[in-house]
Structure formats: structure tokens, C-alpha cells
Amino acid sequence: MTKAMPVFQLDKLVDALAELGYPCREGDMASDVRPDRQPYYERWLKNRDGFVTMERGNISYIGIEEVVRMGPFFNVYFLVENDSLADNDSNAHNLVDTAPYYRLQNGRPADLGWSGGVLSNLLAADPELSQELASNIMKEELKRMRVRAGNYCCVIETGAWDPAGIASIFGMVDRIGAHARKLLKQVHFGEEMGV
């Protein structure tokens, strides 16, 4: 008989983020997500473990998805809403797709930075974000992080074992979201997105 994986404790994540000054609540697809966006967001938000709706800040939603491993491990999706981004638009990917990189030297991370699209330049130029990356790069939540364009959103993806892991990097995620929003305000994609 297969033992069911535990459900992610969304209430603990909501409490941890609220303690850090990020008001949020457990999300409801019908009332929190615009009807025209629901088909595009459901892959990140409509998983068994639910999602969080952010009430302030640069992140719109946090989706949680169970991953079958040796223990309870979860994929985490931070969505930054945007009217112009499309997954099938190479220009959108050239703008926002990025991930941290580093090299281990004598067991310590060296040559830290961001590689990828235009967003990577903004992230690399942020001294506070660079310091946070250097201090925390060995955390699973940062080693697995990547940013990419989705339909009507920028998605910051990572993995975590528990709510505390997500809360520990959320300040960085919010800063990444701020840079993504700033970049996307400066760019004109032309016609309405066709998905």
C-alpha cells in the first residue's frame, strides 16, 4: 500500500510571509484569478497543494506542486502578472529567462551571477540581491531557481522542502519580481498577445 504524500502546509507559509511583512492568504482560483487568466495559470496554481494570493508586493501568486521524491518535496511557482508576456514569444524569453550560476571552489561558491536574458543584467546590477545570492546560494531553493516567461506572467520557479524554506528566500524573490516588473514596463511588445 502506497503512503500518500503530505499536503503542503499553506497556512504556515501564509503566516511566515505575513511575519516578514508580506500580507497574503490562501488562494481561491474562482475569486482571486481573472477568468480569462485561469486557463493559463491553472498549471501553476491548480495543483493539489493549492496556492497563495499575495495582497501586496511584486509577486501575484505562489503555486505549490508536490513532487514525488524520497520525502515531501515541492515545486514552487511565483507568478508576476503581466498582460504582454507569452510562452510562445521568443522576445519574451529573451527578456526575462534567467537563472543564477556559480562555480564551487574549495567547497565554496565562487563566480556567482545570473545568466540568460535582459533581466539577468538587472539582477546582476542589484548589489543587495547579489549579496543575498552570495550568502544563500547553497540553499536548495536558490540552486534550483530559474525565471522564465509564461502566458500572461513571468514565472520564478524553484523547489522547497517546507514553508520555512520558501519564506527564507522570499525577499529575494520579491526583488526579482520588482526587477521583472520594471523591465516589462519599459518594453513595448506591439500588438496584443496571441496565445
Image (spheres, grey):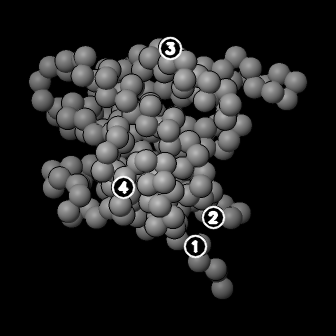
Provide the secondary structure element on which disc 2 rests.
strand
Mark 2 and mark 4: Cα distance apart in space? 23 Å
Q: What residue sits 59% from the left and 77% below the top? A: 4
The answer to the question of whether label 3 and label 2 lie on touching residues, with beta carbons closer than 8 A, is: no
Instruction: Name the mark nearer the viewer: 2 or 4.
Output: 4
User: Disc 3 marks which residue?
Assistant: 125
Residue 159 seen in the figure: no
Quadrant placement of the N terminus: bottom right
Q: What residue sits 49% from the left and 48% below the top? A: 20
Provide the secondary structure element on which disc 4 rests.
strand
Q: What residue sits 58% from the left and 73% below the top? A: 6
Mark 1 and mark 2: Cα distance apart in space? 7 Å
Residue 73 seen in the figure: yes
The answer to the question of whether label 3 and label 4 lie on touching residues, with beta carbons closer than 8 A, is: no
The residue positioned farthest toward the right in the image shown: 106
Q: Earlier in the sequence, mark 1 or mark 2?
A: 1
Instruction: Name the mark nearer the viewer: 3 or 2.
Output: 3
The answer to the question of whether label 1 and label 2 lie on touching residues, with beta carbons closer than 8 A, is: yes
| Residue 123 x %, y % | 48, 21
Which mark, by number, is residue 72? 2
Name above or below for residue 177 compared with residue 11: above
* Crowding at mark 1 (Cα within 10 Å: few <14, some 14-19, many 20+): few
Near-viewer residue (165 or 148):
165
**Which image quadrant for residue 90?**
top left
Name above or below for residue 71 compared with residue 137: below
Q: Earlier in the sequence, mark 3 or mark 2?
A: 2
User: Disc 4 marks which residue?
Assistant: 24
| Residue 110 x %, y % | 74, 20
